[in-house]
C-alpha cells in the first residue's frame, strides 16, 4: 500500500514495539481504503514464531488481518504456523532471508482439508523481499489453495 517511511513506518513501529494495538485497525482501514482488494474466502496472516509471540504478546500482522476481515466481512483464521524460529528479517540480506525462511512455515493440520480450491489473502505488515509472503503462499498452494493474494501495509 505504501512505502515504509513516516508516517506509515511510525505507525507500524508503534504497533509492533510500543504495543499500540488499535493501530492494527487503522492500518486495516488504510489497506481497505487505498487498495482494490479482491473478494476472498479467508484472510490469514504471516505467522511469527512462538518465541517472538511470547516476547511481543501478539502478532502484528494478525491484528491488521483481523481488522481487514471485519471490514471486508470475510472470515479470518490463523492458518499458517511458523515451525522454525528465525532471526529478525529486517536485519537480514536478501540471500539470508531466502535461506532463513526455507521450510519455516506449515499449514495448521486442522485446515488442510478445507482450503482446497479457495481464495486466501495473506496479510503482512512490511514487505521487503517478498520472501515471507512467497513462502507462505507456497505452503498454502501445497495445501490446495487455488488463489493466494498477498497484501502488505508497506514496502521497504
Image: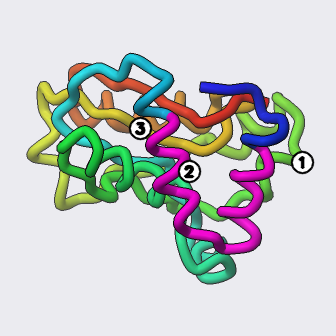
Give whichever of discs 1 and 2 has the lower sequence position.
Answer: 1
Question: Image point 29% across, 44% down: which residue?
Answer: 71
Disc sitting over residue 122 in the figure? 3
Secondary structure type for disc 1: helix
Question: Image point 66% across, 62% down: which residue?
Answer: 15
Residue linked to disc 1: 91
Q: Residues within 10 Å of mark 1 (few under 14, many from 20)?
A: few
- Between 104 and 132, the residue placed more toward the observer is 132
Q: Position of residue 6 (x, y in %)?
A: 83, 40
Residue 98 sits in quarter: top right
**What is the distance, in whole Å, between disc 2 and disc 3 at their CAs?**
16 Å
- Between 152 and 86, the residue placed more toward the observer is 152
Residue 25 belongs to magenta span: yes
- Between 88 and 144, the residue placed more toward the observer is 88
Question: Image point 82% across, 29% down: which residue?
Answer: 94
Q: Position of residue 37 (x, y in %)?
A: 35, 22
Left or right: where 89 falls relative to 57: right
Q: Looking at the figure, which quarter contains the C terminus?
A: top right
Q: Residues within 10 Å of mark 3 (few under 14, many from 20)?
A: many
In the rendered image, the vertical position of residue 22 relative to residue 97, given as above or below: below
Residue linked to disc 2: 104
Give whichever of discs 2 and 3 has the lower sequence position.
Answer: 2
Q: Looking at the figure, which quarter contains the N terminus?
A: top right
Q: Which residues are magenta?
A: 9-30
Of marks 1 and 2, the one in the foreground: 1
What secondary structure predominates along the stretch shown in magenta?
Answer: helix
Give whichever of discs 3 and 1 has the lower sequence position.
Answer: 1
Residue 72 sits in quarter: top left
**What is the distance, in whole Å, between disc 1 and disc 2 at their CAs?**
18 Å
Left or right: where 36 falls relative to 147: right
Of marks 3 and 1, the one in the foreground: 3
Amino acid at each position: 500500500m505504501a512505502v515504509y517511511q513516516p508516517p506509515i513506518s511510525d505507525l507500524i513501529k508503534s504497533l509492533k514495539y510500543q504495543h499500540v494495538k488499535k493501530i492494527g485497525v487503522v492500518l486495516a482501514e488504510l489497506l481497505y481504503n487505498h487498495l482494490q482488494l479482491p473478494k476472498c474466502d479467508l484472510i490469514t496472516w504471516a505467522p511469527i514464531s512462538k518465541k517472538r509471540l511470547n516476547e511481543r504478546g501478539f502478532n502484528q500482522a494478525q491484528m491488521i488481518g483481523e481488522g481487514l476481515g471485519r471490514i471486508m466481512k470475510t472470515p479470518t483464521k490463523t492458518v499458517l504456523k511458523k515451525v522454525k524460529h528465525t532471526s529478525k528479517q529486517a536485519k537480514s540480506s536478501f540471500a539470508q532471508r531466502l535461506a532463513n525462511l526455507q521450510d519455516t512455515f506449515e499449514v495448521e493440520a486442522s485446515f488442510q482439508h478445507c482450503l482446497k480450491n479457495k481464495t486466501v489473502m495473506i496479510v503482512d505488515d512490511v514487505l521487503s523481499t517478498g520472501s515471507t509472503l512467497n513462502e507462505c503462499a507456497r505452503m498454502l498452494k501445497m495445501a490446495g489453495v487455488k488463489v493466494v493474494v498477498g497484501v502488505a501495509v508497506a514496502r521497504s
